[in-house]
Image (cartoon, rainbow, N blue to C red):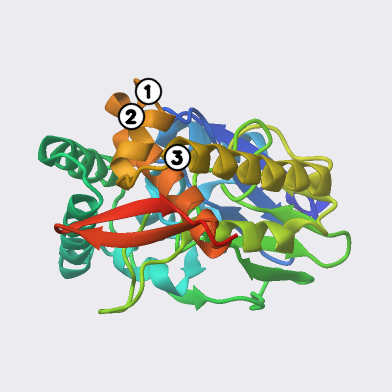
Amino acid sequence: MTDSWMDSKNQIKPITIDTPFQVGPVNVYLIFSDALILVDTGPATTEARSQLHAGLKKHGVSIKDLDLLLLTHHHPDHMGMTAEVAEYATVAGHHRLAPWLSEDQAFIKDRIAFLQAFYEKHGMEDEVIRAVQNQNHAYMSYVEAAPLEIPLDEGDTLDGLRDWHILETLGHAQTHLSLMRDADRTMVAGDHIIRHISSNALLEAPYERDGKRPRTLLQYREGMMKCRAASKIYSGHGDPVEEPAALIDRRLHEQEKKAAYIRSLIGTEALTATEITRRMYKGLYERQPGLTFSETLGHLDLLEEGKQVKLTEEDGLWLYHQSVNL
């Protein structure tokens, strides 16, 4: 560690790392506080590993200097290289992160079984389900297994991160955490708030056996409201958000407009979520069935919450109808 480390105290330094995923490069962050903190790692690829080490060197430190690794969520572009960093730093993240990080096979099999049955009930074709499951498996192959040492929840604080606290910002992932600095309301928010794109509230299985499916877009909207007070947000992708409240209000309005359009696509029919997704995302569904289905389902949840659609079961399929008693 060079003498310049102390000169950087209280600063947040980004390191941009390429990923093999459609989302493009990911931002990980060094926080120079009472301890040296790395937020996220990038995926487990040779290129990403080289870029992480080069980024650390640029800021006058090395991987051996890290005290704590804080993971914002379980997606591989954010936690893929945890095993390497964990040789030197203590690993902290959401309490639900542990089975993802350890690659718990029973846990993963439960995810697969839930999604198989759920997609079938919503009318997704068998070959498309196989493609989605295979894509999910390939996606998580960019993670190297490691233990979670500090499980975190809403409101927690961390040694070495004085004046920061944890916010649970679910929706994009059921393991998603953000950091808020109390003094100036600066946030490091992973994929919860991204300036140039709207983060997808992804379908996930419940984490408790026989639990209810999380309504991820509703969670995401609740999490965005927690972020409105931020003065600046450092995101997992792209440039920092300088006016968070304005962006958040715009995103909330866009979601409501999209939900209204999806309701109009249903018309007087009774449709599966897959049929609605095909209408909403003509052509794109074939290329990105999992993402487009999640996006549609989230807005159907929003409509159902507002009693603008209702869900019935017929012949083993779940069907959405417009509600008439508005």
The secondary element bearing badge 3 is classed as loop
Q: Which residue is mark 1?
A: 282
Mark 3 and mark 2 in contact (Cβ < 8 Å)?
Answer: no
How far across and down, in percent of the image, does residue 180 sit? Answer: 74, 63
Q: Which residue is mark 2?
A: 285
- Work out whether residue 30 or residue 260 is closer to the camera in this orientation and state it: 260
Nearer mark to the viewer, of 3 and 1: 3
Q: Amino acid at mark 2?
A: Tyr
- Asked which quadrant contains residue 168, the reply is bottom right
Q: Quadrant of the C terminus?
A: bottom right
How far across and down, in percent of the image, does residue 150 sit? Answer: 48, 75
Regarding residue 188, the answer to whether it shows in the image is yes
**218 over 49 or under it: above or below:** below
- Taking the image as shown, residue 287 lies to the left or right of residue 26, namely left
Task: Please report the residue visible at 79 percent of the width from the left and 56 percent of the height from the top.
Answer: 228
The secondary element bearing badge 2 is classed as helix
Real-space Cα separation, disc 3 to disc 1, in angstroms: 17 Å
The disc placed on residue 176 is none
How far across and down, in percent of the image, does residue 58 sit? Answer: 64, 34
Mark 1 and mark 2 in contact (Cβ < 8 Å)?
Answer: yes
Real-space Cα separation, disc 2 to disc 3, in angstroms: 20 Å
